[in-house]
């Protein structure tokens, strides 16, 4: 049977939080909106992939979930199946999906060879079919010191150079180069494309969570697996200073431990000015309505806050990775956001003052953030170039809307 259209396979390992899947979903939705006859299939390990809506011509395959512990070790989310068996199942499903789907393009998110090298065999097999292999990297992967420590024993730079046709960095070159400080051959450097940040738009869905209060500071921590400390610090700031101009809406995230959830709900109720939400798949609507925002500076959080031009206070995670610290520090340097280190946020009076200062801070647009948010358009342009080079005349680029 004749196959029509072009197929893109995306891989998102999703071992902790929501960032990888949400980034892949944003890219996939943008691509099918801008390019007709394009089909995207996302391979995801997220345990809540089904909680998100997907556009027509975008679908996902769920592989067994693995979680990353705070120690950096991994474990299967299914207690009666050990990690090795889970990883074997994941690798097999990835390989079988690629063989069945027969992608023209494969985009791997963040982990070049996948979790525990689970995608390497599939990459090597697809390489022989002429599939265009693309590695998508965050603007900041980690500090150069920690990334080199992680990648050097795996000979990762050499493998990336061998297998990938292009490397997309989801940020502007003027902001950060995730490979700075590593020994990168010229052959690989020439294949790096800085796309700009991935702009987010308010969802068209009519559903929304309607906060009780009209004006509020939004506090989010992504998936919430390691976000309880920040929420408790914000609670302590409000408990110590009743003069903070606005109340808060806190979004816990689906991975926050039950004991932390219970404590946060109880303390928030006592303040009388903090509303707590378990999870909202349409978080963008809350961001749009917020007076200001507080978060940890994961990539998606950063892009969302910047896209909606919100006064922002980042309290970045500083271990086991320094990715958020690097991104937040750089954002503060160029005037995009305010930053408070976690150890300082634990002082209620210091965080309370930071919230007072946040309300008076400049908007990111004053520092020129809009010019940095061209990532989705750039990705569509580069994808179109790849498609045209593959000579598929049945594909067309849509101007101004979805097919």
Image: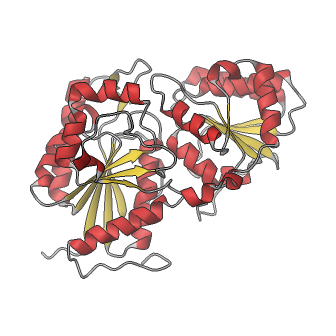
Please determine whether, in this image, residue 237 is positioned above or below residue 190: above
Among all residues in the image, which is located at the extreme right? 243
Which residue appears at 53% of the width and 26% of the height? 226
The one of 21 and 188 positioned closer to us in this rendering: 188
Q: Is residue 300 visible?
A: yes
Q: Residue at x 17, y 60 (%)?
A: 102
Q: Residue furthest left?
A: 128
Q: Quadrant of residue 46?
A: top left
- Name which residue lies at 18% across and 59% down: 131
Q: Quadrant of residue 352?
A: top right
- Dividing the picture into quadrants, the one containing residue 356 is top right
Q: Is residue 397 above or below residue 160?
A: below
241 horizontally vs 18: left or right? right
Instruction: State whether residue 283 appears in this view.
Output: no
Q: Whole-percent x and y of residue 278?
A: 61, 37
Image quadrant where one finds the C terminus: bottom left
- Residue 250 lies, in percent from the top left, at 68, 37
Q: Position of residue 237 (x, y in %)?
A: 78, 24
Q: Quadrant of the N terminus?
A: bottom left
């Amino acid at each position: 049977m004749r196959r029509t259209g072009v197929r893109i396979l995306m891989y998102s390992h999703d071992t902790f939080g929501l960032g990888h899947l949400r980034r892949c979903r944003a890219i996939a939705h943008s691509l099918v909106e801008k390019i007709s006859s394009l089909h995207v299939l996302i391979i995801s390990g997220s345990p809540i992939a089904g909680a998100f809506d997907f556009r027509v011509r975008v679908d996902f395959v769920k592989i067994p979930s693995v979680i990353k512990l705070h120690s950096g070790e991994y474990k299967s989310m299914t207690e009666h199946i050990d990690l090795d068996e889970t990883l074997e199942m994941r690798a097999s499903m990835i390989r079988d999906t690629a063989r069945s789907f027969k992608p023209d393009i494969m985009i791997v998110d963040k982990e070049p060879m996948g979790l525990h090298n689970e995608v390497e065999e599939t990459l090597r097999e697809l390489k022989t079919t002429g599939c265009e292999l693309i590695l998508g990297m965050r603007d900041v992967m980690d500090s150069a010191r920690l990334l080199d420590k992680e990648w050097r024993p795996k000979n990762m730079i050499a493998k990336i150079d061998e297998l990938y046709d292009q490397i997309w960095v989801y940020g502007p070159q003027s902001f950060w180069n995730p490979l700075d400080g590593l020994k990168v051959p010229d052959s690989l450097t020439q294949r790096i494309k800085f796309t700009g940040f991935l702009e987010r738009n308010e969802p068209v869905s009519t559903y929304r969570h309607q906060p009780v209060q009209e004006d509020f500071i939004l506090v989010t921590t992504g998936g919430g697996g390691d976000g309880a400390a920040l929420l408790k610090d914000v609670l302590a700031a409000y408990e110590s200073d009743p003069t903070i101009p606005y109340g808060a809406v806190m979004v816990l995230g689906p991975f926050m431990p039950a004991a932390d959830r219970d404590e946060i709900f109880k303390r928030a109720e006592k303040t009388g000015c903090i509303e707590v939400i378990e999870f909202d798949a349409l978080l963008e609507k809350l961001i749009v309505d917020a007076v200001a925002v507080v978060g940890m500076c994961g990539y998606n959080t950063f892009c969302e806050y910047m896209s909606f031009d919100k006064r922002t206070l980042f309290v970045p995670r500083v271990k086991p990775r320094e990715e958020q610290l690097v991104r937040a520090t750089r954002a503060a340097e160029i005037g995009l956001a305010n930053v408070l280190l976690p150890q300082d946020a634990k002082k209620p009076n210091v965080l309370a003052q930071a919230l007072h200062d946040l309300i008076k801070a400049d908007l990111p647009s004053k520092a020129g953030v809009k010019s940095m948010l061209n990532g989705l358009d750039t990705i569509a342009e580069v994808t179109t170039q790849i498609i045209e080079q593959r000579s598929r005349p049945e594909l067309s680029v849509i101007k101004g809307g979805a097919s």
